[in-house]
Image: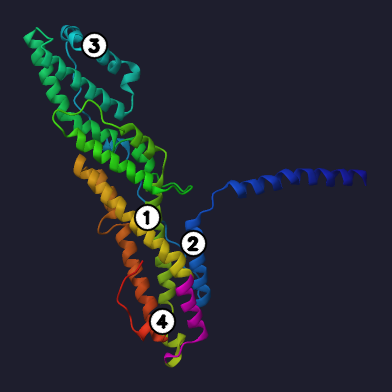
C-alpha cells in the first residue's frame, strides 16, 4: 500500500513539470495567425457547403539564390613590391596591408566596398597633389583606379543582392511576423546608395549603407510576404473547389434564398470581408511596394539570370502573385454567381469587379 502511494506521489510530481513545460510551450510558441485565418474561413465554408475541405497542395516556394549563383568576382589587382613601397606617399600601404591580411580577406562585401571607395579616394587625392615622382608608378595607380572604379558596380552587387543580409531578409522559413515597412525603407536606402555610387568620381563613403543592411539582417519580412502570397494562392484554390462544388439551383430552388444560402451570405459579409478580403488587400499593397522597390534596385545595379528567375517566380506574369490574382477573380465571380442565383446580390446581378 505504501509503495502504491509513493508511486502515485512520484507520478504526480513528474506530471507537474510536464504540464508546466506544455503550458510554457503554448505561451512561448508563436501563433501562426495566417494559417488560423485561412483555416477559419475554409472550415466555415466547408461546413455551410456540406463538403470536406480539399487537401492543401504544397506551397510553391523558391529559395533566394545562393552565394555561388549571385556573387561576382571583381578584378584582383596586385602591384609589384617596389610599386607597393612607393605607394607609402599616398597613404595606401596600411590600407592595402589590412585588405591583404587574413581577416581582411574574409570581410563582408559591404566592407570590401568601403575599402575600394577609400582606396579610390586616397589614390585620386594622391595624384591630384602630385605626391608620386615615378612616372611608372603614377601610370600604374591611374590604371588601378580606373579598373577599380569600373568594378564598383560588381562590388556593390556583392554587398547588396549577393549579401547575407538580403538573403536573410528573404528567408521563407516559418516564424514570427515582422513588419515589412522597415525592410522596404532599407531597400530604398540601398537604391539611394547605388545612385550615389554612380557619381564620377564616386563618393569616399556611402552614408547609412551599413545601417540599411543591418535592418535587412534583423528581419525576415520579405520572405514572410512571399510565403504569404504562396499560401494565399493555395488557400483560395481550396476555397474555390468548395464554391465550385455548390450548385445555385440546388442551393436556392426557383431562385428563392434558402436558409443555408443566407448563412453563406452572412459568411461573405462577415468573416470573408473582415478577415480574408482585408488581409488580401493588405497583402496586395505590400506586394506591389516590394515589387516596385526591387525593380528600382535592379535599375540601379543591373540584373542577373538567377535573380531574375527568382523574382519572376513570385512577381512575374506566371508567378505566385499572378496566380493569386487569378484565384481571387475566380473566387469573386463564384460568390457572385451563387448569390445572384439566390437573389442575394445587390441588384441581383454580378458587379464584374475584382475587389480585395
Q: Secondary structure at mark 3?
A: helix
Q: Earlier in the sequence, mark 3 or mark 1?
A: 1
Q: Which residue is mark 4?
A: 339
Instruction: Name the residue at the right extreme.
Output: 1
Q: Which residue is mark 1?
A: 60
Measure the alpha-carbon separation of dots 1 and 2: 20 Å
305 with respect to 274 (left or right):
left
- State the image coordinates of residue 148 (x, y, percent, origin top left): 17, 25
- State the image coordinates of residue 253 (x, y, percent, origin top left): 45, 91
| Image quadrant where residue 147 sits | top left
Q: Which residue is mark 2?
A: 37
Q: Is residue 244 magenta?
A: no
Magenta extent: 255-270
Q: Earlier in the sequence, mark 2 or mark 4?
A: 2
| Residue drawn at point x = 15 percent, y = 33 percent | 199
Q: Residues within 10 Å of mark 3 (few under 14, many from 20)?
A: some
7 with respect to 61 (left or right):
right
289 up-or-down from 187: above or below: below
Amino acid at each position: 500500500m505504501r509503495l502504491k502511494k509513493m508511486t502515485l506521489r512520484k507520478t504526480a510530481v513528474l506530471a507537474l513539470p510536464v504540464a508546466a513545460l506544455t503550458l510554457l510551450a503554448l505561451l512561448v510558441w508563436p501563433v501562426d495567425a495566417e494559417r488560423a485565418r485561412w483555416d477559419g474561413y475554409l472550415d466555415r465554408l466547408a461546413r455551410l457547403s456540406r463538403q470536406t475541405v480539399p487537401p492543401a497542395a504544397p506551397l510553391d516556394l523558391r529559395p533566394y539564390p545562393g552565394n555561388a549563383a549571385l556573387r561576382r568576382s571583381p578584378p584582383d589587382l596586385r602591384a609589384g613590391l617596389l610599386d607597393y613601397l612607393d605607394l607609402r606617399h599616398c597613404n595606401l600601404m596600411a590600407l592595402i596591408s589590412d585588405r591583404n591580411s587574413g581577416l581582411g580577406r574574409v570581410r563582408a562585401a559591404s566592407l570590401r566596398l568601403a575599402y575600394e571607395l577609400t582606396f579610390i579616394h586616397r589614390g585620386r587625392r594622391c595624384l591630384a597633389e602630385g605626391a608620386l615622382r615615378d612616372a611608372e608608378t603614377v601610370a600604374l595607380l591611374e590604371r588601378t583606379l580606373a579598373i577599380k572604379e569600373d568594378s564598383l558596380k560588381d562590388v556593390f552587387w556583392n554587398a547588396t543582392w549577393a549579401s547575407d543580409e538580403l538573403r536573410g531578409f528573404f528567408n521563407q522559413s516559418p516564424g514570427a511576423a515582422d513588419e515589412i515597412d522597415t525592410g522596404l525603407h532599407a531597400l530604398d536606402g540601398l537604391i539611394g546608395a547605388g545612385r550615389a555610387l554612380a557619381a564620377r568620381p564616386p563618393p569616399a563613403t556611402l552614408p547609412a549603407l551599413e545601417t540599411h543592411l543591418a535592418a535587412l539582417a534583423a528581419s525576415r519580412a520579405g520572405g514572410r510576404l512571399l510565403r504569404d502570397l504562396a499560401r494565399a494562392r493555395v488557400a483560395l484554390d481550396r476555397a474555390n473547389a468548395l464554391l465550385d462544388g455548390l450548385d445555385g439551383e440546388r442551393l436556392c430552388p426557383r431562385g428563392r434564398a434558402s436558409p443555408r444560402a443566407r448563412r453563406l451570405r452572412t459568411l461573405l459579409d462577415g468573416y470573408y470581408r473582415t478577415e480574408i478580403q482585408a488581409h488580401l488587400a493588405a497583402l496586395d499593397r505590400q506586394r506591389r511596394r516590394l515589387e516596385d522597390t526591387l525593380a528600382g534596385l535592379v535599375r540601379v545595379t543591373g540584373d542577373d539570370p538567377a535573380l531574375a528567375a527568382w523574382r519572376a517566380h513570385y512577381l512575374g506574369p506566371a508567378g505566385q502573385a499572378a496566380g493569386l490574382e487569378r484565384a481571387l477573380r475566380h473566387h469573386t465571380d463564384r460568390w457572385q454567381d451563387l448569390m445572384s442565383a439566390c437573389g442575394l446580390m445587390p441588384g441581383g446581378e454580378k458587379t464584374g469587379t475584382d475587389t480585395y
